[in-house]
Amino acid sequence: MLRGVRAALSARCHSTLLGETAGCTPLPMPTVMVVDGWRFHFFANEGPRPHIHVVKGDASAKVWLDDLSLADWDNLTKADRRRILKMVDEHQKRLREAWDEFFSTK
């Protein structure tokens, strides 16, 4: 499954209380798919509950893959949230297979 996944590197930075960057560690951010400009990805250091991050511009969501619910979102309209949940539902098997394959090799 992950043969088709593009592994991008992202700098995950931690800020100090003064707002300065304390340090950045590049982490793989496997992109599972892109649909209508929405990028579906996860971070390499994710927690145990399977989920997917969905990003387009400054809009983002985190969707639990087991019950197809929104864990979190930012800058999304109700229509965007419905559309994201629909896309995750349509591709749930593919997204879950990518999650399982990636995290089983860690």
Image (cartoon, rainbow, N blue to C red):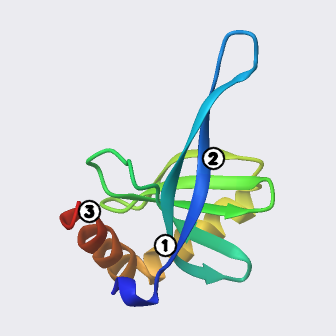
- Name the amino acid type tagged 2: Trp
Figure check: 74 above or below 98 = above
Left or right: 94 as drawn, with respect to 59: left
Mark 1 or mark 2: which comes first in sequence? 2
Q: In this view, does 37 lie above or below 49?
A: below
For disc 3, the marked residue is: 103
Q: Measured from the top left, where is residue 100 in percent x and y?
A: 24, 69
Kindly give the residue lying farthest to the left in the view shown.
104
Q: Earlier in the sequence, mark 3 or mark 2?
A: 2
Look at 26% across and 62% down and name the residue there.
103
Q: On the picture, is 19 further left or further right than 60?
A: right
Q: Mark 2 points at which residue?
A: 73
Gap between marks 3 and 1, in whole Å?
Answer: 19 Å
Dot 3: within a 10 Å radius of its alpha carbon, few (fewer than 14), some, or many (20 or more) residues?
Answer: some
Q: Which amino acid does label 1 sit on?
A: Val
41, 81: nearer the viewer: 41
Question: How far from the left and from the top, in percent, is residue 90?
Answer: 46, 83
Say which of marks 3 and 1 sits in front. Answer: 3
Task: Choose the circle earlier in sequence order: 3 or 1.
Answer: 1
Badge 1 marks a residue whose secondary structure is helix
Viewer-closest of 105 and 42: 105
| In-front residue for pair 62/6 | 6
Residue drawn where x is 77% and y is 55% of the image: 77
Give yes or no for contact between labels 3 and 2 (Cβ–Cβ under 8 Å): no
Q: Could you say where residue 50 lies in the image, as x and y percent from the top left?
A: 32, 57
